[in-house]
Amino acid sequence: MTALIGLQDCDTSIMAIQTKKEEGPAKIHGLKEGLNVMEKRLEAEINQLEEYKRDRRKSEQDIEDVESRIEKSNEKLSNIKSNKEYQAALKEIDGLKVEKSLLEDKVIEIMEEIEILEEKNVGAKAESEKLKEEFEKDRDEILKELKDLGQDLENLEKERARFSQTIDKDLLKRYDHLRKYKGGVAISPVVKGICQACHLGIPPQKFNDLIRGDELMDCPNCMRIIYWSEDEGLQNVIQKC
């Protein structure tokens, strides 16, 4: 029985380690996804900033073009002789001035947006750098833990093999079968008449038989192999293992 208990302890620990090993890459992936979201947001803000700057340069060029047209129109005024043409030229110049004013207002708006986005961009860069440092730190810790878990798993596999060699082959086959179909738990202690795997009571007569320890017994409810955990002799043997 002590070998079976030891084997179950090994398998329980192995399952726990395997679960942690499976969680490790998922955790790294989740952290990486968070970093990617931040980096994409930063990239989008940088692209937006560049677009604003391109718009500002284009608008400034448009202003220069309008100013050039106004200057040329003013030069033509001196050569115009009819009042009708003169009034039309003045109207055209006024229209160009309105166009220039609108472009200047647009440039001011763009410059304000650029200023806001540049300040936001500085904060986003700092946040991104911090998140990257945290990611690398957490990733390294997880990788170290996975390495340690790998060593623990190797040691447990050796210990499991040692226990398996001391157990009767038919009993070992029965144990492995139960473990496969009982959520990894094939053997369970009974405490105060209660199976600790299914948490149901053992009938009094069967419990008395269990206490005597004359034979290997199953839980009548969950069919797992059971043992009396309050057996001091058994506990002493387990502690020495």
Image: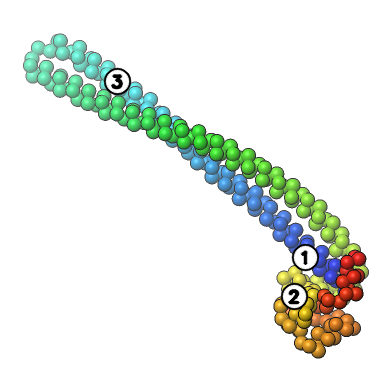
Q: Callout 3: few (<14), some (14-19), or many (20+) C-alpha neighbours within 10 Å?
A: few
For label 1, the residue is 12
Q: Amino acid at mark 2?
A: Gln
Q: Callout 2: few (<14), some (14-19), or many (20+) C-alpha neighbours within 10 Å?
A: some
Say if 142 sits above or below 53 in the image.
below
For label 2, the residue is 196
Q: Amino acid at mark 1?
A: Thr
Q: Are marks 2 and 3 in contact (CB under 8 Å)?
A: no
Say if 82 sits above or below 117 in the image.
above
Residue at the extreme bottom: 205
The alpha-carbon separation of the residues under discs 2 and 3 comes to 87 Å
Residue 218 screen position, x and y as percent: 80, 81
Instruction: Say which label, 2 or 3, has the lower sequence index.
Output: 3
Towards the viewer: 84 or 126: 126
Say if 207 sits above or below 229 in the image.
below
Towards the viewer: 124 or 110: 124
The alpha-carbon separation of the residues under discs 1 and 3 comes to 79 Å
Instruction: Say which label, 1 or 3, has the lower sequence index.
Output: 1
Q: Nearer the viewer, mark 2 or mark 1?
A: 2
Residue 85 screen position, x and y as percent: 11, 18
Q: Quadrant of residue 180?
A: bottom right
Residue 39 screen position, x and y as percent: 54, 40
For label 3, the residue is 65
Indicate the secondary structure of the residue bearing disc 2: loop
